[in-house]
Amino acid sequence: MATHDAAHGGDYAHGDMEIEEHEKTFSFFVKLTKWGSLYLAATLLLLTLWFCTPTGFLGAAVSAGVLLVLGTLVLSEKHKL
């Protein structure tokens, strides 16, 4: 396998690449996945309880709201439990 580093005449120098944009993109992806998963779970809980159990809309909405509040507290970077 060919090596592509500065010692062998290549333009690439290991460890010299700027990675700030990569870090920002990865941070955005992690946050989007984290919060998207929470809202998807709350939506699924709401719809499952509303349509598949005798709980009704009010009970399903309260359960989904509790999940959102607890999930926000757990996932928040400012508030650690």
Image: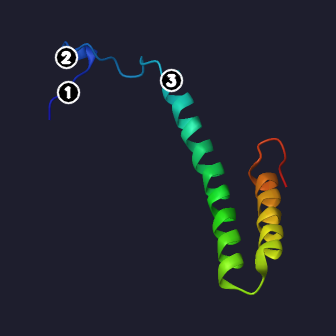
Q: Secondary structure at mark 2?
A: helix
Q: x%, y% of residue 34?
A: 63, 50
Q: Is tag 2's residue or tag 1's residue first in the polypeptide sequence?
A: 1
Write the residue at 66% across / 79% down: 51
Q: What residue would you read off at disc 2?
A: 8
Q: Are marks 2 and 1 in contact (CB under 8 Å)?
A: yes
Indicate how the structure is coloured in the image.
rainbow
Q: Is residue 74 left or right of residue 18?
A: right
User: Which label is found at residue 41?
Assistant: none
User: Which label is found at residue 21?
Assistant: 3
Which quadrant of the structure image shows residue 46? bottom right
Task: State whether residue 60 is above or below residue 4.
Answer: below
Q: x%, y% of residue 81?
A: 85, 55
Q: Is residue 52 left or right of residue 18?
A: right
Residue 63 vs residue 29, the one in the foreground: 63
Could you classify mark 2 by the number of other residues whose Cα lies within 10 Å: few (under 14), some (14-19), or many (20 or more)?
few
Mark in front: 1 vs 3: 3
Task: State whether residue 9 is above or below residue 74.
Answer: above
Q: What residue would you read off at disc 1?
A: 3
Q: Are marks 1 and 3 in contact (CB under 8 Å)?
A: no
Which quadrant of the structure image shows residue 6? top left
Q: Is tag 1's residue or tag 3's residue first in the polypeptide sequence?
A: 1
Mark in front: 2 vs 3: 3
The Cα–Cα distance between marks 1 and 3, rounded to whole angstroms, is 26 Å
Q: Secondary structure at mark 1?
A: loop
Kind of residue sitting beneath label 1: Thr
Residue that extends furthest to the bottom in the rendered view of this protein: 54
Kind of residue sitting beneath label 2: His
Q: Which quadrant is the N terminus positioned in?
A: top left
Q: Secondary structure at mark 3?
A: helix
